[in-house]
Structures are given as C-alpha cells and as structure tokens.
Amino acid sequence: MNDVPEDRPSAVDRFFLKMMQPENLGRILRWAWYISLIMLALGYILIFSTISDYINF
C-alpha cells in the first residue's frame, strides 16, 4: 500500500541518458554525416540523370 513512486528513471529516461554520453553523441554525429553525404550524392545523381537527356556528350 505504498503510493510513493519509485525514484528510478523510466526506460525512456535511461535510453536518453545513455544516448547523451559523449561517445554515443560522436557516433550519432558520424552516422548523420554519412547519411547527409549519401543524400547529397543521390541528389546529384538524380539531377544529372534528369538533365543528361538535354546534354550532348
């Protein structure tokens, strides 16, 4: 009959505490950088494939 909530963080709180550690932030930043470079390359490929019909090589 103890109505006092536990002083333990929830699973979501523990997840975010773990993700905010410096080594995990570096890993997240590295993957964000890779994804942005891939998106940039895919954008250039899409633009080139779209306008390649109008360019005479």
Image (spheres, grey):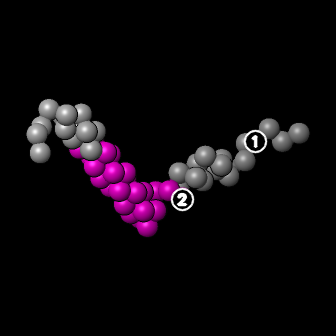
Give the alpha-carbon distance from disc 2 to disc 1, as whole Å: 26 Å
Which residue occupies 31% across, 45% down?
A: 42
Q: Position of residue 16 (x, y in %)?
A: 53, 51
Residue indicated by mark 2 = 18
Q: Position of residue 43 (x, y in %)?
A: 27, 41
Query: Which numbered marker is on residue 37?
Result: none
Which residue occupies 58% across, 52% down?
A: 15
Q: Position of residue 44 (x, y in %)?
A: 23, 44
Left of 5 or right of it: where is 43?
Answer: left
Question: Within 10 Å of the Cα at label 2, are there few (<14), some (14-19), or many (20+) other Cα atoms?
Answer: few
Position of the N terminus, as image quadrant, is: top right
Residue that extends furthest to the left in the rendered view of this protein:
56
User: For the magenta stretch, what is the residue range?
Assistant: 18-44
Residue indicated by mark 1 = 4
Question: Within 10 Å of the Cα at label 1, are there few (<14), some (14-19), or many (20+) other Cα atoms?
Answer: few
- Identify the image quadrant of residue 23: bottom left
Select label 2 or label 1 by which is in front.
2
Kindly identify the amino acid type of the residue bearing the numbered disc 1: Val
In reply to whether residue 36 is colored magenta, the answer given is yes
Left of 45 or right of it: where is 7?
Answer: right
